[in-house]
Amino acid sequence: MERIIDRIKYPSDLKSLKKHDLSILAKEIRDEIIKTVSVTGGHLASNLGVVELAIALHYVFDTPEDKIIWDVGHQSYAHKILTGRRDRFSSLRQYKGICGFPRRDESIYDVFGTGHSSTSISAALGMAVGRDLKGMKNNIVAVIGDGAMTAGLAYEAINQAGHLRKKLIVILNDNEWSISPNVGAIAAYLNKIMTGRRVSVFRKAIKRFLKRVPFVGNHLYLLMKRVEEFTKGFLTPGILFEELGFRYIGPIPGHSIGDLIDTLENIKKLNDKPILLHLITEKGKGYRPAEENPEIFHSVGPFDISSGTPHSISDKKTYTDAFSEYIVRFAHEDKKIVAITAAMREGTGLSRFAKEFPNRFFDVGIAEQHAVTFAAGLAVEGFKPVVAIYSTFLQRAYDQIIHDVCIQNLPVVFAIDRAGIVGADGETHQGVFDLSYLRHIPNMVVMAPKDGHELGDMLKTALLLNRPVAIRYPRSEIVGKDIKDKPEPIPCGKAELLREGKDVVIVAIGSMVYPSLEAAFYLEKEGIDAAVINARFLKPMDEELLINWSLLTRNVITVEENVLLGGFGSAFLEMLERNRITGVKIRRMGIGDLFVTHGSQKILRSSFGLDSEGIANETIFMLKNLSRI
């Protein structure tokens, strides 16, 4: 039996369907998303919550002429299925498959690439201004989740949008709050009426009439407006947006396709000011395990559909697990340690800390800039703030790291999770820039552990240094050793010689240390005697040890899971130049001048030669071909 989804290739195919068919289609799309994500992994709960919204938007608007921007982007799966990518949807997040986020080079329906939070309203406003400058009339819609509304960028955009009064639709997808069915039904009914043409014309007529009443007309109008605002503020959270220049509509239930379509059809006709439509949706809608555990199913690996149980549960600890244990242990010993994160309590491993030290834990929401400056303020008061943020998200707070922490040389510790190649989330989430964007900042110490033991030692070191420190570690299981019983501080800037050798020295940092050791054992079978150094510190570097071994072997390979531009290898070259070292053959291994696509960590590392085989092959090639510098 043919399903409705089989007849839908592009949004234009939706136009011929009846509203009853659209509800059936929503279920079929959910089944498609669940089936695919159970194999590929991905963002499940958030995508299940916006299926009806995606259908309604493409049903009402004429995309891609009308533009839809999906904030964060991890709610765009239904959108992808409806816009010509269903036949490739099974390749979601796989190497050379479709991306888990909107990408402009993937489809004309992905009008703006998103992966980080809170950018949609700014982008949509820019498009609206561009549209008007070109004399066009198309609609522009930004879909933003309520979590993204904790970031200042969203309010900066709202502030300007209200001032410019451009035709713009912002849809607030509120999937955290609850609303009772009765209130939701009433709200949907009232908003269908309030956005209708008759009521809009009536309101304008009343406004004109009241203002013409002699002596008291303006007072009557202002009184009516205040009563309306008071009623809205009492019944809805919309008064803030009204005051910022938006017409607020909502909240309405976000899983009723009929109500969504009627409201969106009416909104299309309103063009006197920007509009904010407030929807109430349920994360994980239609799949009970995700409904009951939306946080777990926000981003999930492959799982069994019938039970929701992950296919593979490893008993090995990750670097995140290790960080969690160490910071809790240190916090018991030192009451001045506080922990800060930006809407990533679970992801950064701070849930246990939050439970054991609720008064010393702060989740600031999706507000990385604030997180860093907030930490700086705590440091001024004598505390030891540890800011745990993913590498790619810390980029959002670059100015605050420089201006508010490093210029003032404040003792803020940055625990940078998901550093290096992250994998299937793709370009927007790969943490491959942090070594480059941190190492050139004065006063900053930058280090990376090779294993779980060294992570404990480095965190201990960071908390004692009394200056800005960054520790970056990967999204992976700890290699070899488990958690260290008694972490010990490392002398600042001291590297570690792991293996001696006379032919070449491989100098690696962080996640590349163990692959480099494995490469050295392989090279030994090829008759090449390779030394291996664990640099540990990018800044300051152990110049004495590194220069001595460079001169001893005259052949150096540097290995980092970071972009080559401005990274560890660049720092190594600068060290040689600064010390006027010549006659050394050197090869830098890392990531070139590009954005890393999505795919498994194993495949991506292999593609850049950042595994034991690649390091060994590059070493052999260098010894045979490159001239000295």
Image (spheres, rainbow, N blue to C red):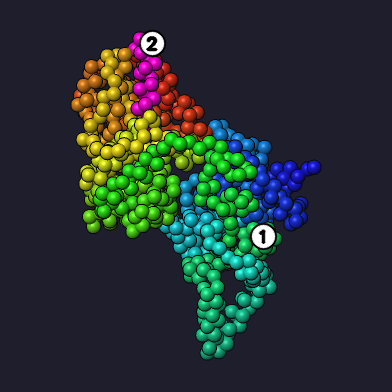
Tell me the residue that label 1 is attached to. Answer: 256
Q: Residue furthest bottom?
A: 215
Residue 253: image quadrant is: bottom right
Q: Residues within 10 Å of mark 1 (few under 14, many from 20)?
A: some
109 or 189: nearer the viewer: 189
The residue that appears at 53% across and 43% down in the rendered structure is 300
Q: Is residue 367 left or right of residue 276?
A: left
Prevalent SS, magenta region: helix
| Image position of 512 with respect to 24: above or below | above
Q: How many marks?
A: 2
**Over which residues does the magenta segment extend?**
511-528
Q: Which residue does the image show at 58% across and 61% down from the upper left?
A: 280
Please name the residue shown 43% across and 52% down the image. 343
* Residue name at image x 63 percent, y 47 percent: 78
Going by the numbered disc 2, the residue's amino acid type is Glu
Give the label on residue 526, or none: 2
Q: Nearer the viewer, residue 264 or 284?
A: 284
**Residue 441 visible, this angle:** no
Q: Earlier in the sequence, mark 1 or mark 2?
A: 1
Q: Residue furthest right?
A: 1
Q: Amino acid at mark 1?
A: Ser
Picture coordinates of residue 610, whole percent (x, y): 42, 26
